[in-house]
Amino acid sequence: MNRSRLIWGVILVLIGGLMLLNAAGVRLPGGMSPMELFWPVILILAGAWVLFGVAVRGKVDTEQAFVDLQGAREASLKISHGAGELNLHGGAVANELARGSFAGGLDQKANRNGDKLEVRMRPARDFMDFPFFGPRAQLDWDVALNSDVPLALTLSCGASKSVLDLRDLNVTDLKLETGASDTRVILPARGRLSADFDLGAASLDIVVPDGVSARIRASVGAADLNVNQTRFPKAGGVYKSPDFETAVNAVDMTVDAGAASIKIR
């Protein structure tokens, strides 16, 4: 039986039983009705269940999988990743767009559109059936991507720890959206690309490889933003390499963040 259905069934039976006792005029010692006791008991049980979920990690199987390049000359890849660790790097072979190990399994969809392969990757099943309680599965993914194929990469991460080593990849466009996460990004060492970072309560460390110029525009609320101004001096609210417009290798970066800690170096 599905765990969330079992828990909701128990809760509904409990509520119904307490309502029946209340309608029958049953009183506890001290004159308290059963329904008056319901919410304190529920809160105590819920708190204990959450603590149990923190201490006990859910068990999931790990799947080995790959994405066939299908002869495409360029690709777009959208990865949705939940709680856990995500390691992204080069290393896929010539006829593959991606290869890796996926805790919790992989749900992938690929569509060839002319010379472009459009791929979406996400966990095989939803591990958030009952989002506030109980032990959860941690989705640890290790993914190797093709270093030669021009790639538009979109990442949506939950409460995760991510290392995105893109230095050897041919990324033309990067979009990263994270929640409560700890993320380290090493940007590509070749080509010109645009990179957009949208952060919640997150920690983000961005490494711009030597020989890569950058323009950085940041809109931050209560964020702590630390930019290496030796490489990217600030002028008019924008951090920019002196040779950004003419550099062969460059990143045009935007950062939108709330209560985050951001380091760009």
Image: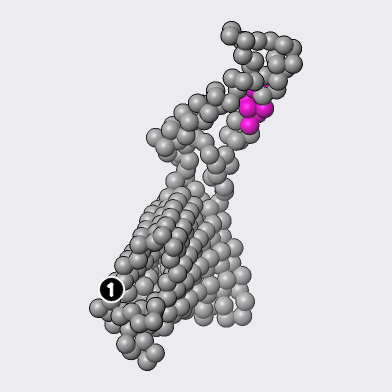
Q: Is residue 217 visible?
A: yes
Above or below, 167 against 103 in this view is: below
Residue 250 drawn in magenta: no
Helix, strand or loop under label 1: loop
Q: Is residue 68 visible?
A: no
At horizontal 39% and vertical 35% (from top left) the residue drawn is 55
At horizontal 37% and vertical 70% (from top left) the residue drawn is 166
Q: Which residues are magenta?
A: 8-14
Q: Is residue 260 left or right of residue 226?
A: right
- Residue labelled with disc 1: 228
What is the crowding at mark 1: few (fewer than 14 residues within 10 Å), some, or many (at least 20)?
few
Q: Quadrant of the C terminus?
A: bottom left
Above or below, 14 against 260 in this view is: above
Q: Where is residue 91 shown, x and y percent of the image?
A: 37, 68
**Nearest the camera: 128 or 251?**
251
Q: Where is residue 164 shown, x and y percent of the image?
A: 38, 64
Can you tell which quarter of the image residue 249 is in?
A: bottom left
**Nearest the camera: 78 or 105?**
78
Q: Quadrant of the N terminus?
A: top right
Q: Is residue 178 left or right of residue 24?
A: left
Can you tell which quarter of the image residue 6 is in?
A: top right
Q: Where is residue 39 shown, x and y percent of the image?
A: 58, 26
Above or below, 115 against 77 in this view is: below
